[in-house]
Image (cartoon, grey):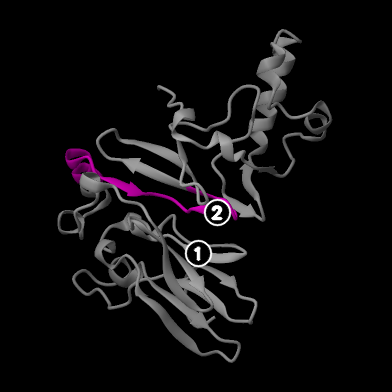
Amino acid sequence: MPIRFMSFTLLEDGNIVLINEAHCRKYGNPRGHPNAIFYRLLLVTPDGQTVEKGGPVNQSFEENVLSKTNFGLMKNKKVSYWPLFNDTLFELNGNEPHPSLIVDFGEHALDTEKVTGLSDEEFFLVCKENDYYHIAGQHCQTPEFISLNIDVGGQENGYCCIYNKTSGEFSIFRSMASHSSNPMNLVPQLSVDEFFVTIIPTQHIMDVKNYLAYMKGKIPLKDLKFCPSQELLDRIDENSNPVLGFYTLRPEKINSESVYLAED
């Protein structure tokens, strides 16, 4: 590849779409001598031509070290990307990016003038003082749902949002993490067809095995609803690879009335 890149995907026509890695524009150069390379969406053709698509990505936030993380290309039938701190999800139509979904935070939206060029610490302090919300983390989507993460500055907390593209309904969760009888974190890392996919660390499964052995049959059956089968647990030890968890969502359960925000 002719350039460093953050993420890429291969299109059906043989073109490669990637987001270049431009973090060195300031921090990889002598103090006071940043270069002019910003994050861009690029198309690399099979014959090696590089074509810029969609213009600079997150240029307003590139003095913030955090801006280089947690956004990337998502491919599940369609190719989409959600730049960090941006309110807009983009999808590729052919080889051209177009806005697909806009999240309107209203009075909680980032004021670009107040956060441009800030360090990580300064950025989060301004978000806390002004109660700014922003998209944080890589999104995933299936034909029906989009998963995205939202940081709420005033609360210094993050939330996972599941949005139904068909109905417009959504659910927001304070926590979707694993617990003693369920090793699966429901925040997806990727998606395939109608399935969201999460990565389950081996240690989480070992924790469940140890918990079940310690309780020795004293756990109510209702608390084992999402527990892995004994057959799967028996196959896992400390040297096993992480496990992929595939799951689908029921549309009728994705609605604002179903939201439960777990307290710390």
Residue that badge 2 annotates: 141
From the top left corner, tell me how far across and down residue 126 is, in percent.
19, 45
From the top left corner, tell me how far across and down residue 8 is, in percent.
54, 69
Tell me the element at label 1. strand
Which residue is situated farthest in the front direction here?
A: 167
Q: Which mark is residue 182?
A: none
Asked if the residues shown at circle 1 and circle 2 are in contact, with their CB atoms under 8 angstroms apart, the answer is yes
Residue that badge 1 annotates: 80
From the top left corner, tell me how far across and down residue 244 is, in percent.
69, 45
Q: Amino acid at mark 2?
A: Gln
Tell me the element at label 2. strand
Residue 262 among those drawn in magenta:
no
- The image quadrant of residue 236 is top right
Q: Amino acid at mark 1?
A: Ser
Which residue is situated farthest in the top direction here?
A: 218
Dot 1 alpha-carbon crowd within 10 angstroms: few under 14, some 14 to 19, many 20 or more? many
Q: Range of the magenta residues?
A: 124-147
From the top left corner, tell me how far across and down residue 45 is, in percent.
56, 86
- The image quadrant of residue 245 is top right
Residue at 20% x, 58% y is 112
